[in-house]
Amino acid sequence: MPKKNEKSKRAAKSGKGAGRKVEAVQDGFDAASLMDAEKDRQSREALLASDKLYYRIGEVSRLTGVKAHVLRYWETEFRWMAPPKSRSKQRLYRGRDIEFVWLLKRLLWEERYTIAGARQRIQELGVDGALGLLDVPAGVAPVSAGSGDGPSEAASEGDSASTQSQAEWVVLRAALDEIHSDLTLVRGALQEGA
């Protein structure tokens, strides 16, 4: 064992291997987050296709990839997430509750909001507006009239050309994000083969 520690210390001092480790962690994170996003998309489609009314916390945990203790904690932090309980005090999540879990997962884990920041974002958009974020690809900021985002900030709020430009901007950003995702997957595949 001591030889391994000495070897690690020498490698750390010389800087050898450090760059490769960081690069591998970053690449692994990109691939893992892409796979996680795809799994969430498939789970959301399955949820929408299902006629089941209520889900227990274990089922929600499996569907969303969020551990049960985290779900319970989020309930205490977000008043909008309050699944009813059965007579035996088990949480019974509805489809909308599960959608809200995916929203929190995206805001907190992917977009790196703090709890307070996520709460504020949901308040700004309203729950229905915030849930609409799930239909926008990650990394694409939803554009609302007069927000100043995108190339049409000089146009007036009520202008139909402004609305059309904003819609085009969102579509363009979504397409670029999709291309980025594809390129990241290709890079990962090439690195595995090398």
Image: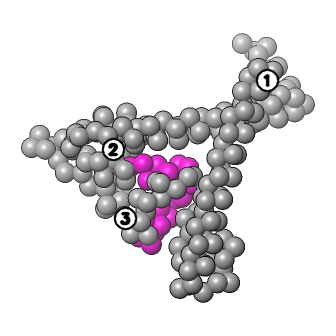
In this orientation, which residue lies closer to the viewer: 62 or 95?
95
Q: Residue at x 66, y 59 (%)?
A: 172
SS at mark 2 in the image: helix
Residue 54 within the magenta-colored segment of the rendering: no
Q: Quadrant of the N terminus?
A: top right
Q: Quadrant of residue 66?
A: top left
Image position of 178 (left or right of 121)? right
Image position of 2 (left or right of 70)? right
Image position of 14 (left or right of 134)? right
The percent position of residue 36, horizontal first and vertical second, equals: 53, 37
In this orientation, which residue lies closer to the viewer: 85 or 1?
85
Q: State the CA–CA distance, disc 2 to disc 3.
A: 18 Å
Q: Residue at x 22, y 39 (%)?
A: 52
Q: Which residues are magenta?
A: 101-124
SS at mark 1 in the image: helix
Instruction: Give the mark nearest the N terminus, 2 or 3.
Output: 2
Image position of 103 (left or right of 13)? left
Looking at the image, is 39 positioned above or below residue 178?
above
Q: Residue at x 62, y 55 (%)?
A: 174
Q: Residues within 10 Å of mark 1 (few under 14, many from 20)?
A: some
Q: Residues within 10 Å of mark 2 (few under 14, many from 20)?
A: few
Q: State the CA–CA distance, disc 2 to disc 1.
A: 50 Å
Label ID, residue 8: 1
Task: Report the coloring of the rendering.
Answer: one colour
Q: Residues within 10 Å of mark 3 (few under 14, many from 20)?
A: some
Label ID, residue 48: 2
**Residue type, numbered disc 1:** Ser
The percent position of residue 44, horizontal first and vertical second, equals: 40, 42
- Callout 2 touching callout 3 (CB < 8 Å): no
**Residue type, numbered disc 3:** Val
Instruction: Give the mark nearest the N terminus, 2 or 1.
Output: 1
Residue under pointer 3: 127
